[in-house]
Image: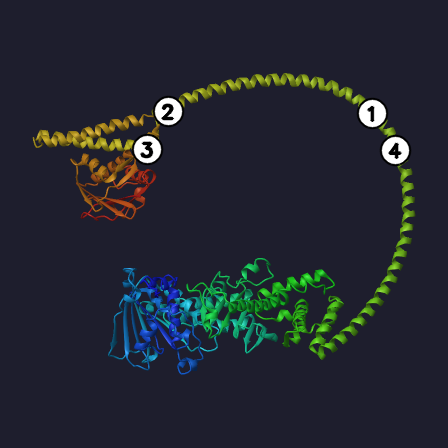
Amino acid sequence: MGELVFRVSSELKNILGRDLITNDYIAILELVKNSYDASATKVEITFAQDCITIADNGKGMSYNDIVNKWLFVGYSAKRDGTEDKESDYRHKMKRNYAGAKGIGRLSCDRLSQQLVLTTCSKESKIVENLDIDWSKFEVDQSKEFDDIKIPYNSLNKEISFPDNSRYGTILELKKLHSEWSRPRIITLKKALEKLINPFAETNDFVIEIKSSIDLEQDNKILSEIKALVNKPALNDKEHIEIADKRNKLVNGIVENRIADILSLKTTQIESVLKDGIITTRLTDRGILMYEIQEKNSYDKLSDVTVNLYYLNRAAKYNFSMKMGVQPVQYGSIFLFRNGFRILPYGNEKDDSWKLDQRAQQGYARFLGTRDLIGRVDVETENIEEFKEVSSRDGGLIESPSTIQLFDYFTSVHRRLERYVSGVLWGLSFLQKEYFKNAKIAQEQRVKLQTEEKDSSSAGHVYESIGSRVDFLLLVKSLVNDKNIQVLYYNADLANILADVDETEIIQTQFVDDLETLATETHDRDLIAKIEKFRLELDNLYKQKRAMELRLQREEEKRLEAEKLAREEEKKRIEAEKKFREEQIAKEEAVLKRREEEAKRKEAELKKIEAELAAKEQEARRKEAELKREEEEKKRMAAEMDRDAQIMKNRYLSSVRNTSQEVEDLIHTILISSNELDSLVKIISSGIKDNSIDKSDLVSNLDAMAFHIMRVNTLSRLITKADISMLSSARKVDIKEYVQEYLSNFSTSVEIAYKIEYQNSIIKKISLLDLSVILDNLVSNSKKAGADKILIVFNADGRKIIMDFSDNGCGVDFSKYTVSSIFEEGVTNRRGGSGIGLSTIRNRMGKDMNGEIQLLENGLYFEHGATFRLIFN
């Protein structure tokens, strides 16, 4: 029988490194924790091009430390107790270790391909250097881990570590796997702010971030902050702006100002478990409400502190004003082990403490993460019982110690919640029938909740009978718990009996409960007040009873008088009724006689009305008949007029259409007519003096044929009734079509092209519209005396630009502007109509989704106009 051993693949580097360290921020946090565990007082994190340097002034490492500890993957000298904690600086600083798994060093692989480690220990005074290329472990996973060689040498020079220390460790992370932009560095800085307990009483560990490429932006922000700070009086908005700008700085010491803010404006509970005793203090905006002590019932916990702060609306606003961020975005309840944060406790939207699940079950009764901020501090040398999940952001592994830790936290949270929901929100005193009038109790609760939301002090609590009642209930529950010793409670808030007027509100049962509390706490002053209160209550009862008897007798007299008055009133009503009945009988007899006379006259009147109605009906019949005959004549005349108008409209529609499209076509026909006239003169002159050759003659005749064909086509289109066919569109290469079309004018003017945009320009347009535009531009150039035209194609983003330039006389800008020249009727030529440029603008905008602009004179030639056509 033999023995076998495990073999370890080089893939172990990934399993223990980048697979466990889930993001870059956690990787840097792990390396900073290693510096802390090395007894460093300062860590400098420097960002440069494709490099991050993490330097500390800790105790450093010797050659033996590197070989036997740092390169021993998974080994932790902290865990096996080989670190001499009695003789090193750590003992003087009273630090416990932040980590103990022995894999934090592999965080470097998460960040970069190459790691250069430089270190020097106080004992050896020799500078050691390692140069690790992590990619060598990824070449062949069948290769064993310890077969990959790490270059090493000793440097014969002195290295300066942070704070000019001769000892420490420098990690140079080169060939970074990801880019570190300014926003990412700021996010890291915020994570580092919360890495070390921001509520700690001492600050023996400093982290500084350096980034030369961000210095200019930082200086600009600092100047803006200085300008705001120097203002004589800052408002809340400016305070928030200053805090926000400070949060955007990269370079500088990592610090956290939250402890000072929370101690001033919040409701706080602090519970300290130490030396077998749990001491709990609850303060409300700086005023101690109660302090209790109890034996430690958690045998797995020895040194734990829970600090919770309830934030009302005023406290949240104050937090945002000072910190430049809303509390819910900053975080909630953090967990620190040996002064270092454990993720993800406290992260935004994290509910590891199981508070939000409960808060959703009792709206406005329970405190969730949105209402709280705080921390739980665990100091322990037994890290195994409070071990993190290897992924580093999964919290603590469940153990008997962590279970007790959560139970302890829950008990502290419930005590703060009891005070807030009862004393501040007025929920608890409604559950007991201490108020004689339920409506008054409800009003007390509404008033409390309204005042509490925006209050920065606890003054309204003392003024509320409901808050004072509930505070006494709370103290009573603490006193009745035999495991709790009440060291102090706020007697001023408990002194409800000072105001005798409240006796009309409070039930006697409350006084009995209060007397029990006074007896249990041996509060002689309160007992005396209760006795005095009972005497005053008895006197008030006697006075009230005498008043009630007097009022009762007066009420009986009043009822007797009312009875006599009612009997007299009854007799008077009966006499009036008899008199009215006699009067009614007389009036009815008179009315009867008048009614009979009226019936006789009515019969005679009906007879006369019937005769008159018959005559009137006959007259209306004859009148209606005449009216019908007259209306029939008018209807026939109207129909004749309508038919005549219809015929007239049809005729006019067939011979005349004065729409803008037709006017443009007529203008184009005139342009072609002028071109034909010019071509005829050129041919005629050439034939007379025998100066024209055959090729020029053929070219001119082709141009004449083009214009004749266009005139015929346009003439036929003008006579069509449906003019909409003129705007039919098709896909066309504008650049190619312009060159082909303008070749028809080459006999009368020299046309050149400058093409700076080489791609095809495909657009769905009406060829007739584009032809009209080109005709007008060429015609205007020739009328301006031009004999040369330059077409320039270019592009600007998704816009195609065509510049049309000539060497004519240009535009007289003393008379016209770049916009007025396009108005209909405005012309640069004597006797012109101004239709041409107006037509171009309308065609470009309406039909081609473009525009035309007039540029300056002499842009491409020594003189002459330039128009820019833009196709979107």
Residue 599 numbered tag: 1
* 348 relative to 805 in the view: left or right: right
Q: Report the Cα–Cα distance between label 4 and label 1.
A: 16 Å
Residue 483 in view, yes or no: yes
Label 3 vs 2, first from the N-terminus: 2
Q: Where is residue 59 in the image (x, y as percent from the top left)?
A: 35, 79
- The quarter of the rendered structure image containing the C terminus is top left
What amino acid type should be assigned to the residue bearing mark 3?
Answer: Ser
> Residue lying furthest front in this view?
1
| Left or right: residue 260 compared with residue 80 | right
What is the secondary structure assignment of the residue under circle 1?
A: helix
Local crowd size for mark 1, using a 10 Å CA cut-off: few (<14), some (14–19), many (≥20): few
> Which mark is first along the chain, 2 or 1?
1
- On residue 727, which mark appears? 3
Q: Name the residue under label 4.
A: 588
Find numbered disc 3 in the image and state the secondary structure of the residue it sits on. Answer: helix
